[in-house]
Image (cartoon, helix red, strand yellow):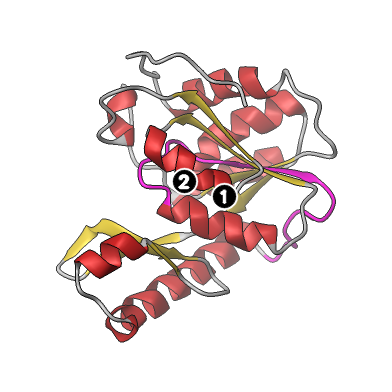
Amino acid sequence: MRQPATTSQTYTDRRDAGRRLAGLLSERDWVEPVVLGLARGGVPVAAEVAAELDAPLGVAVARKIGAPEHPEFGIGAVTAHGPATFDDRSVRALGLGPGDLEEACERERAEAQRRVDLYLQGREPERAEGRDVLLIDDGLATGVTATAALRALRADGPRRLILATPVCAAEAAEGLRAEADEVVCALRPEGFRAVGQWYDDFGQTTDDEVLDLLAKGA
């Protein structure tokens, strides 16, 4: 795995980050690559990678499960199908049992399914079996949503499963080595607090933007 130097460099926006990440990934030989953006913020980054690799652009959806009373603190994630993924250490620290998060899991699973239906517009997802699948996000903080997405994609039988992101927390990247065949981080800075601190413009990506990018990248 290529190890980028520690730096305080920032990106202009997600498209700029995608172009720089694409520069790293274009140096490799891929087998029938398919590029999937982790919705929503990962899709603009993935669009640049897909264009550089001349690969189809698709989307992956995983939804964060927040702690009770503190929904912004992600302790798990879920995709439209399959079991939820949890940060066991956080769950234990909060003294939670399986039943305490069941309602949140079902709510976020339903939202994940809504987004999948919206983004695919009745199309079949890109075939992953036997191909190199590159899952792209705009940054990696805790890795909980990426974990859920990677586990769902692994079940589709890809040849290789790569997680690539413009910036990541070192601890999260190390933890995800067990889920992906390779983790590629363009920047792995010291003093990482949040993904948005490494972008000049980190405005929210909308559903309409995702749909437009997917239509152009199909």
Give the total number of marks visible in the rendering. 2
Tell which residue pokes out farthest to the left in this image. 69
Range of residues picked out in magenta: 122-143
> Is residue 131 found inside the magenta-colored segment of the image?
yes
The quarter in which the N terminus is drawn is top right
Please identify the quarter of the rendering in which residue 92 is found: bottom left
Q: Secondary structure at mark 1?
A: helix
Task: Tell me the residue at 40%/33% (across/down).
Answer: 170
- What kind of secondary structure does the magenta stretch mostly adopt? loop
47 vs 143: above or below: above
> What is the C-alpha distance between the residues marked 2 and 1?
7 Å
Q: Nearer the viewer, residue 141 or 93?
A: 93
130 vs 30: above or below: below
Mark 1, Cα crowd under 10 Å, few <14 / some 14-19 / many 20+, is few
Residue 75, image x, y percentages: 31, 61
**Residue at which label 1 appears:** 178
The circle drawn on residue 150 is none
**Residue at which label 2 appears:** 175
Amino acid type at mark 2: Gly
Q: Nearer the viewer, residue 119 or 95?
A: 95
Q: Is residue 120 left or right of residue 17?
A: right
Amino acid type at mark 1: Ala
Please identify the quarter of the rendering in which residue 9 is found: top left
Q: Secondary structure at mark 2?
A: helix
Task: Tell me the residue at 60%/21% (across/down).
Answer: 2
Task: Tell me the residue at 51%/63% (across/down).
Answer: 115
> Is residue 196 found inside the magenta-colored segment of the image?
no
Q: Mark 2 and 1 residues: CB-CB less than 8 Å, in contact? A: yes
